[in-house]
Amino acid sequence: MIVLGIETSCDDTAAAICSNGKILSNLVSSQKIHQSYGGVVPELASREHDRLLNFLVCNAIVEAGVSLQNIDGIAVTQGPGLAGTLLTGVCFSKGLAQGLDIPVIGINHLEAHIFAKFIDKSYVEFPFICLLVSGGHTQIWIIKEFDNFKLLGESRDDAAGEAFDKGARILGLGYPGGPHIEKMAENGDPHAIKFPKSFMNNKSIEFSFSGLKTSLLYFMNNSKSSDEKVPIEDVAASYQEAIIDVLIHKLKQSLDQTNVRTCVIAGGVAANNRLREKAQKILHGISIHFPYINYCTDNAAMVAFLGEQKLNQGKSSSLQFGINPNLQLK
């Protein structure tokens, strides 16, 4: 089976081709238009998707070495995400599916992230704990098998990726914030500043990053009137360390509570090298898995891959299915 995957949940326009579990092409266009705003402007994102999507799909098909007539099905992100951007991808996919008379299936963006590790064919033992950490979500799941999972906990407020983005904006760095803070932190002292770490002494599996963001804001405002200046590299490193310490602590806590010895760390923040290093250092005796870097951030390969699994099971969506910006994973 050959499946076209389409991803437009936020500000990355993506198209990919998957055949028999193998990714034949995976194209992503990250929209630069939002950088001057310090965050995603939904209306601009929707217009960029509309402008880029047809071009990317055509190029994904050519790069995969197949033709449009070879496509057996289409998988598209249905949610969660921004309403306007999701609508662009879903409408395009439904129109193309109807024109080719092939099935289309709506895919949960979170589920696609969770199973992105399976694209590289490496063995992941069930059950496993998944730390799903991105710009919009910070959650911990227990995955018993495909289509059988349970949410153990999530953030009460900001997601970790959002904390990186907002922190970068406070520090005067670029968007998206994660890579900029990580790069700045490479030459900094992660223990220079003691930023707050929420719920570290709480047995419940939950996160909160809004207080950390506020603490950074106060620190930077106070530093303007202080004679003793802290290098921005140290600020970035300490801020990043606070986020990562909480993520790893809660992941370890969930592993201990469930007695599961395998974990997957997925989502855009999983591309952070410091997070990967600390996970390997702290999670002793745990089989730790990360998707390839290009499958951590938003991409259509994970959508096409999961879509093919579901289409092979005889699942599909009607042409009347709609978007769901707040789609839950159940």
Image (tube, rainbow, N blue to C red):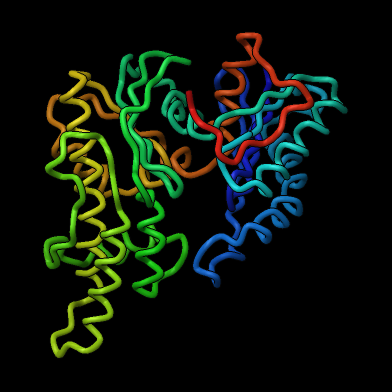
Q: Position of residue 299 (x, y in %)?
A: 55, 40
Q: Quadrant of residue 106?
A: top right
In the rendered image, the vertical position of residue 232 relative to residue 328, given as above or below = below
Q: Could you tell me which residue is drawn at 51 percent across and 63 percent down?
A: 39
Which is more toward the observer, 311 or 211?
Answer: 211
Image quadrant for the N terminus? top right
Q: x and y percent of residue 31 in the render?
A: 60, 58
Q: Position of residue 33 (x, y in %)?
A: 61, 65
On the rendered structure, is 30 left or right of 292?
right
Q: Which residue reaches farthest right?
A: 99
Which residue is located at x 60 percent, y 9 percent?
Answer: 313
- 229 vs 153, left or right, is left
Residue 253, quarter of picture: top left
User: Residue, x 79% and y 20% (percent of image)?
Assistant: 102
Residue 148 visible somewhere in the drawing: yes
- Answer above or below: position of 3 versus 60: above
**Spot occupied by residue 117 in the image (x, y as percentages of width and height):** 41, 28
Q: Is residue 265 visible?
A: no
Please give the name of the residue rendered at 42% of the width and 40% of the height, measured from the top-left corner.
267
Relative depth, front residue between 282 and 133: 133
For this orientation, the residue located farthest to the top is 313
Name the one closer to the observer, 201 or 273.
201
Please say if 188 is above or below 156: below
